[in-house]
Amino acid sequence: MRRFRFAAVVRQAESGKAWAEKARRLEATGFDVLLVPDHLVGPRLAPFAAMTAAACATTRLRVGTLVAANDFRHPAVLAKESATLDLLSDGRLELGLGTGWMAADYIAAGLRLDPPGVRVSRLAEAVTVLKGLWGDAPFSFSGAHYRVDALDQQPKPVQRPHPRLLLGGGGPRMLGLAAREANVINLGMRVRADGTGPDGADGGLSAFLDKIDLVRTSAAGRYSDVELGTSIQQLGTERSRESWSAADSSPQRETPQVLLGTRRDVVDKLRHWRDTHDVSYYVLHHERDLDAFTPVVEELSGR
């Protein structure tokens, strides 16, 4: 049986000291991972500097991205940054990757938002390049989107063969890629092609279960090595969406993305989804819910 692992998304702090205190609090209360988002707009720290600071402030807590936008960095640059951070954190990096999707980022920065199929294909090539550059030998690659010529980057990651890789998504192509390549898969709703937010037509219990079945089938022989996860969008009592967030949890009440009720209700629902559907990696999406969720983590972490 898969054991529970818990992560929290932390977006900002008013100082380095405050950021370090947030990281140490997560470590002390049993969280496994601190995750930093990657957007160009909104109140969010830049991920790699923030992850490095969090790793330096802790000894056990893993650090990661939810998720690094592939369109923002060439994979050779991302491979170098990731390997360096994995070394400096003594092998505690969990690199979350996505295509890049939020239209506001692209519009504000003057970037072109390609169709979803193009972005997924580009991400698939990026994963190949990352894993190749994290290997021991010089790596070459020639694809539709990237070209690398006998590049041998140093340092190599501490974790071998490479840092743990998290891929998130809701569409079948993205989930198929994640099933083949990722260590952790964060299940969500498919994003609208124009980058304005999740596609509400992809919500609900049936769609969520279909995604698990797709991953199970696509992962085939490696399914037992894959962690299934999702982001907790609502906890305790339902609240309105944050102004900075594109996430809409309203269709997801029957899924583990929405955990309403008492602490016992939450614990029982998480156990059900772990024991029945293998969903064991839970990401607390809102820092506002940290106080309420900490007792749940203390009860279930590592079990």
Image (tube, grey):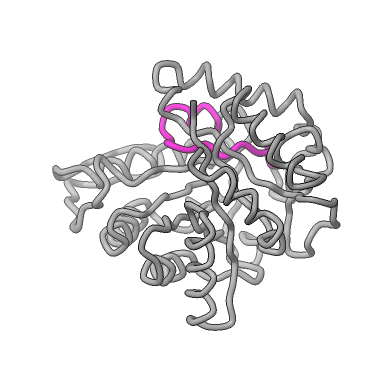
Drawn side of residue 22 relative to residue 159, left or right: right
Q: Where is residue 141 in the image (x, y as percent from the top left)?
A: 27, 39
Residue at (59% x, 32% y) in the render: 279
Q: Which residue is drawn at 48% across and 61% down?
A: 27
Residue farthest left in this picture: 137
Question: Residue 76: within the magenta?
Answer: no
The answer to whether 124 is drawn above or below residue 102 in the figure is above
| For residue 54, side relative to residue 142 (left or right) | right
Stretch of the chain drawn in magenta: 175-191
Front in this rendered view, residue 282 or 171: 282
**Magenta span includes 187:** yes
**Left or right: 64, with 251 as reference point:** left
Q: Can residue 102 be seen in this view?
A: no
Residue depicted at x 64% and y 53%: 295
Question: In this view of the protein, which residue sits in the foreground, 233 or 114?
Answer: 233
How far across and how far down the image is residue 208, in percent? 70, 28
The image quarter containing residue 221 is: top left
Could you tell me residue 73's position as x and y percent?
43, 57
